[in-house]
């Protein structure tokens, strides 16, 4: 684009982890167009993740599985968004519903991934082939690359308040944690088909603590992951700290850890953790 857009809309109403990946896209848009207003449409489950994000001018929570689940609600949302007059729409969620929403938007530039209705919904179509680009962040940044160069990959970012940051620093101090030797584990998953065997996380935890004499392991558990708690408690290791806090407090803690491991990453770290 020759001129910077006045307003950019990013759409991602997928799972929590997907929206977290999209925060890198938010950062890339800000770097590409420093004066542009950035707006986000996301699902209720991601509200806490993006609530205080410093780069967002507005956040529209779209309750697609609740009282906004019908076609009329989608048309109403499209009308609401068209009233804001966006110049660019970046659709980071490759779903039929998101494509249908984009097909109703008036923005002159609408970028999304290939799929059914893509030619109707978007003015620019980007591939979404895991075999070509397996990295979730890169596939999102490719949406912006279709319009303007992306010079580097911005970090994932959660809007953490100063109080939440201070809380995390105090917890680190109280449990004697050193950021350089602290591992974060996120063993749960909203989709059980994506969840690794907890025994694998236990194996990684033991290996980490053996490799780092002063190391600590933070285990982050959500409200629906109570069954995982006894797995780590049974290790009877005081250097394992189970964290059951708000999303943003967890994010503040994660920012101080040398590495974080979730269900899509643990095997890589398992082979490399002695070198970290």
Image (cartoon, grey):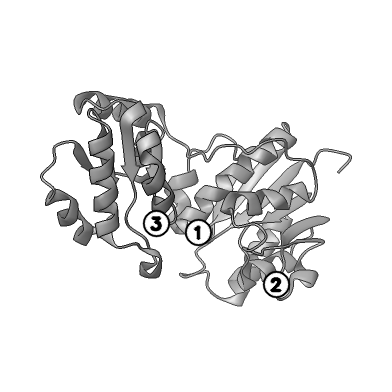
Q: In the image, which is nearer the foreground, mark 3 or mark 2?
A: 3
Q: How far is disc 1 from disc 3 in space, using C-alphas?
A: 22 Å
Q: In the image, which is nearer the foreground, mark 1 or mark 2?
A: 2
Please give left or right for residue 220 compared with residue 48 in the image: left
Instruction: Please state the horizontal and vertical placement of residue 241, each as a whole percent of the image.
Output: 21, 40
Contact between marks 1 and 2 (CB within 8 A): the answer is no
Relative to residue 172, is residue 270 depicted above or below? Answer: below
Q: Which residue is mark 2?
A: 115
Crowding at dot 3, Cα within 10 Å, few <14 / some 14-19 / many 20+, comes out as some
Q: Which residue is mark 3?
A: 263
**Quadrant for the C terminus in the image:** top left
Report the residue at 39% width, 47% height from top: 271
Instruction: Please state the horizontal and vertical placement of residue 267, each as a whole percent of the image.
Output: 40, 53
Instruction: Please state the horizontal and vertical placement of residue 27, each as a whole percent of the image.
Output: 62, 38
Q: How far is disc 1 from disc 2 in space, using C-alphas?
A: 21 Å
N-terminal of the two: label 1 or label 2? 1
Crowding at dot 1, Cα within 10 Å, few <14 / some 14-19 / many 20+, comes out as many
Relative to residue 171, is residue 184 depicted above or below? Answer: below
Contact between marks 3 and 2 (CB within 8 A): the answer is no
Q: Quadrant of residue 62?
A: bottom right
């Amino acid at each position: 684009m020759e001129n910077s857009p006045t307003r950019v809309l990013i759409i991602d109403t997928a799972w929590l982890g997907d929206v977290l990946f999209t925060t890198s896209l938010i950062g890339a848009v800000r770097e590409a167009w420093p004066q542009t207003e950035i707006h986000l449409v996301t699902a209720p489950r991601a509200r806490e993740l993006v609530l205080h994000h410093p780069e967002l001018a507005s956040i529209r929570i779209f309750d697609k599985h609740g009282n906004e689940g019908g076609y009329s609600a989608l048309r109403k949302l499209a009308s609401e968004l068209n009233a804001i007059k966006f110049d660019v729409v970046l659709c980071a969620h490759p779903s039929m519903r998101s494509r249908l929403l984009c097909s109703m938007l008036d923005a002159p530039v609408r970028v999304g991934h290939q799929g059914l209705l893509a030619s109707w919904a978007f003015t620019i179509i980007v591939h979404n082939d895991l075999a070509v680009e397996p990295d979730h962040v890169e596939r999102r940044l490719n949406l912006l690359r279709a319009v303007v160069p992306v010079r580097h990959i911005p970090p994932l970012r959660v809007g953490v308040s100063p109080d939440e940051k201070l809380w995390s620093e105090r917890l680190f101090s109280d449990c004697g944690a050193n950021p350089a030797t602290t591992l974060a584990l996120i063993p749960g998953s909203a989709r059980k088909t994506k969840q690794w065997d907890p025994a694998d996380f236990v194996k990684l935890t033991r290996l980490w603590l053996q490799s780092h004499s002063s190391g600590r392991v933070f285990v982050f558990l959500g409200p629906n992951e109570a069954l995982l708690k006894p797995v780590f408690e049974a290790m009877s290791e005081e250097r394992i700290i189970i964290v059951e806090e708000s999303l943003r407090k967890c994010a503040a803690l994660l920012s101080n850890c040398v590495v974080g491991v979730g269900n899509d990453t643990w095997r890589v770290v398992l082979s490399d953790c002695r070198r970290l």
